């Protein structure tokens, strides 16, 4: 059929890891103790963004693996999307544990 889904997955997958790390770290830092007075809506927005972009990469990669003729880009986008989702899970846990032990 083409390479559209694989290309889209690779594009989202290529920038999902830095975005996931940044958004998950900001969300975890700002959620600890409300030291900076940031509302919970902003911290939930950070977590939604850190899950949304890798999710798009993983979904388009999976569809591209099934539909596209050339599966290399789709597999790369799918793998990068899964790595981004794992980062979006692990980074907030690490930062929240780190900052709750530092900030009473």
Image: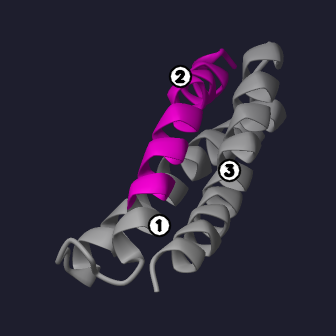
* Between marks 1 and 2 in the image, the one whose residue lies nearer the viewer: 1
Name which quarter of the figure residue 30 lies in: bottom left
Local SS, label 2: helix
| Label 3 vs 1, first from the N-terminus | 1
Name which quarter of the figure residue 29 lies in: bottom left
Local SS, label 3: helix
* Between marks 3 and 2 in the image, the one whose residue lies nearer the viewer: 3
Look at the magenta stretch and give its main secondary structure.
helix
Q: Name the residue under label 3.
A: 87
Local SS, label 1: helix
**Numbered mark located on residue 28 in the image:** 1
| Label 1 vs 2, first from the N-terminus | 2
**Residue 103 on image: x %, y %:** 45, 77
In the image, what residue occupies the spot 45% across and 44% down?
A: 22
Q: Residues within 10 Å of mark 2 (few under 14, many from 20)?
A: some
Residue 82 higher or lower than 24, as above or below: above
88 lies left or right of 47: right
11 lies left or right of 63: left
**Residue 1 on image: x %, y %:** 69, 19
């Amino acid at each position: 059929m083409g390479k559209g889904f694989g290309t889209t997955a690779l594009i989202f997958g290529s920038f999902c890891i830095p975005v996931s790390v940044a958004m998950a770290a900001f969300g975890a830092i700002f959620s600890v103790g409300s030291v900076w007075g940031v509302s919970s809506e902003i911290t939930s927005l950070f977590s939604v963004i850190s899950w949304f972009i890798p999710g798009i990469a993983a979904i388009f990669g999976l569809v591209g693996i099934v539909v596209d003729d050339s599966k290399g880009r789709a597999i790369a986008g799918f793998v990068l999307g899964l790595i981004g989702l794992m980062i979006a899970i692990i980074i907030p846990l690490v930062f929240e544990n780190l900052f709750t032990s530092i900030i009473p």
